[in-house]
């Protein structure tokens, strides 16, 4: 990942943490919705940073997709389930970012003397007698 992409993903994870999901009544059942104001702005910013539409990200958090027969049916999430989806998405993004950063560091060329196997500075040298 390029440095700019890594910063974008990290910023999106932080923005997702600001998204507040609350319960709304829909025909007597509890459905999740993203709060208006700062929470909706955070969701929109996260979507923009990730390169997806605001409505797609909001739908991914607040609804679930079930396959019934040959068709897919979207049903609303509860508030608790939507919060778990939001947190799971943030954790998955952060985990993949961390894995890519570790892989990039491991693939980078090593600087001479940075592997700890050289002389001086570390003890462990000498003949071991004493």
Image: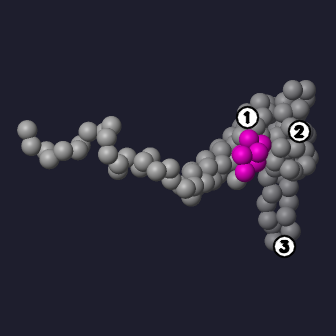
As for residue 23 lying within the magenta part, the answer is no
* Magenta-drawn stretch, dominant element (helix, strand or loop): helix
Q: Which mark is residue 14?
A: 1
Q: For label 3, count other residues whose C-alpha is less than 10 Å away and answer few (under 14), some (14-19) or many (20+).
A: few
In the picture as drawn, the residue positioned furthest to the bottom comes out as 70
Which badge, 3 or 2, is on the more N-terminal residue? Answer: 2
**Which residue does the image show at 50% across and 50% down from the upper left?**
111
Expressed as whole percent of the image width and height from the top left, the position of residue 69 reads: 81, 71
Q: For label 1, count other residues whose C-alpha is less than 10 Å away and answer few (under 14), some (14-19) or many (20+).
A: some
In the rendered structure, which segment of residues is drawn in magenta? 2-8
Circle 3 SS class: loop
> Residue 91: which quarter of the image?
top right
Q: Which mark is residue 70?
A: 3
Which quadrant, please, contains the C terminus?
top left
As for residue 3 lying within the magenta part, the answer is yes
**Which residue does the image show at 9% across and 43% down from the upper left?**
129
Circle 1 SS class: helix
Expressed as whole percent of the image width and height from the top left, the position of residue 19 reads: 79, 33
Looking at the picture, does residue 100 appear above or below residue 62? below
Q: Is residue 9 visible?
A: no
Expressed as whole percent of the image width and height from the top left, the position of residue 126 reads: 18, 44
Give the distance between the C-alpha atoms of the residues marked 3 and 2, in whole angstroms: 32 Å
Which badge, 1 or 3, is on the more N-terminal residue? Answer: 1
Q: Kindly identify which residue carries mark 2.
A: 44
> Residue 65: which quarter of the image?
bottom right
> Residue 20: which quarter of the image?
top right
């Amino acid at each position: 990942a390029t440095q700019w992409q890594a910063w974008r993903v990290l910023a999106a994870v932080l923005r997702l943490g600001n998204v507040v999901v609350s319960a709304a009544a829909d025909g007597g059942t509890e459905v999740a919705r993203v709060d208006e104001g700062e929470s909706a702005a955070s969701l929109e910013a996260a979507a923009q940073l990730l390169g997806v539409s605001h409505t797609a990200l909001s739908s991914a958090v607040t609804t679930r997709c079930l396959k019934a027969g040959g068709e897919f049916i979207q049903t609303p999430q509860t508030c608790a389930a939507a919060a778990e989806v939001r947190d799971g998405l943030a954790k998955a993004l952060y985990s993949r970012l961390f894995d890519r950063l570790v892989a990039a560091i491991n693939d980078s060329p090593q600087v001479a003397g940075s592997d700890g196997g050289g002389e001086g500075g570390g003890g462990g040298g000498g003949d071991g007698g004493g």
